[in-house]
Image: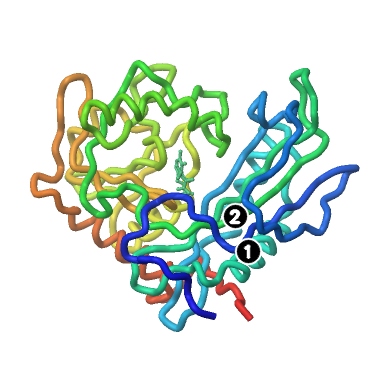
Amino acid sequence: MEKANLDWEKIPFSYKKTDGHLEYRFSDGKWDEGVVVKDDTISLNIAATCLHYGQECFEGLKVFEGKDRQALVFRIDENAKRLAGSARKILMEEVPEKMFIDSIYKLVKLNRRFIPPHGSGASLYIRPLLLGISPIIGVKPSTEYLYLVFSTPVGPYFPTGLKPIKLLVEESIDRAAPGGVGDVKVGGNYAAGLRATHKAKDLGYNEVLYLDAKEKKYIDESGPANFFGITKDGKYVTPDSNSILPSITNMSLRVLAEEMGLKVEKRPMRVEEIFNLKEAGCCGTAAVITPVKSITCRDKTVTYSERDEIGPVCKELYEKLTAIQLGLAEDKYGWVREIPLD
Ligand code: PLP
Ligand code: COI
């Protein structure tokens, strides 16, 4: 099948309509078989719980084309588990792991002409989305759910790509509270952060770096990604917090960092530690590794990259991770699955 006619090297991180998506409905205590839908709009009851009370959660993962045109997906089982965990936390019906994986396999086959060519730097971004759809006006969980999954070809999340970004610690705005829902992937966390990102961008920064909401002493994460630093004595340090999303990319980088001989620490990270790092990065499916140029906090700025270039440790981590995702390096941990396209 011929690829879609797109300028693959230049596609932004934005939504593009593809050949269809899949929809599954849960009612009377069971999931249906799912259907392919060509139209990219949905119809919901005006009283649906997802619309009023934010009863929704989602995932994000990427499919890459290998050098033999195979479709490769990274750690899909982890996304399945995380979606189930998000659903449990806000009292939604879980999507069974098998249904999640089957839905993505069917979706990728359906949209195979939108998988960006190997070497283009782009990928097919998969967005599974779970919505509470019962018309209920009291604050209660739905009894009916819509699970849908769509895809869109994307380039890098930060248009800077591998060019380092500037972060702002914006203490007056919190993303998530301890004991809240910051550790699951629900839409409200992103809505809570919109004005912080807006403010940071207005001031000339690329993103926000959040502190823990209770004490403002520890680093949480960035708006769309986890945070990690490489210390001057060569450790990979990343925050442990109950109000950040457990990133699958970060989980993988910790393994790769250890392979590179770095000591890995996942622990509460005091904000002053930013002054003791030699490199820093934001990591996530969309962000991959986006190197950090500088962090501004309480009127002080620490700069890691004077020349606007990714540092050597972040570069090696980036290369190791993307080589596995693209099927170019040995997949010793079984992170990559090939999606059948015939
Ligand atoms: N943190 C937030 C708030 C995110 O939205 C994401 C993206 O999914 C991440 C971290 C990174 O998680 P992952 O590496 O699983 O994509
Ligand atoms: C992802 O990295 O997949 C996300 O969902 C982050 C989002 C802000 C684009």
How many numbered marks, from 0 up? 2
Quick one: 224 or 211, which is closer to the camera?
A: 224
**Seen in the image, is 342 located left or right of residue 23?**
left
Residue 150, which numbered label?
2
Quarter of the rendering occupied by the N terminus:
bottom right
Whole-percent x, y for residue 121 in the image: 34, 65
Residue position marked by numbered label 1 in the rendering: 107
Q: Is mark 2 within 8 Å of ligand 2?
A: no
Q: What amino acid type is highlighted by mark number 2?
A: Phe
Question: Mark 2 and 1 residues: CB-CB less than 8 Å, in contact?
Answer: yes
Q: Nearer the viewer, residue 107 or 225?
A: 107
Q: Amino acid at mark 1?
A: Leu
Q: Secondary structure at mark 2?
A: strand
* Residue depicted at x 41% and y 73%: 117
Q: CA distance from mark 2 to mark 1?
A: 7 Å
Up/down of 97 relative to 141, above or below: below
Label 1: few (<14), some (14–19) or many (≥20) C-alpha neighbours in 10 Å: many
Residue nearer the viewer, 225 or 234: 225
Quadrant of the frame with the C terminus = bottom right
Q: Position of residue 176 (x, y in %)?
A: 48, 25
The disc placed on residue 267 is: none
Q: Residue at x 79, y 24 (%)?
A: 136
**How many neighbours does mark 2 have within 10 angstroms: few (below 14), some (14-19), or many (20 or more)?**
many
Q: Is residue 89 left or right of residue 300?
A: right
Query: Does dot 1 land on a helix, a strand or a loop?
Result: helix
**Residue at 68% across, 44% down:** 42
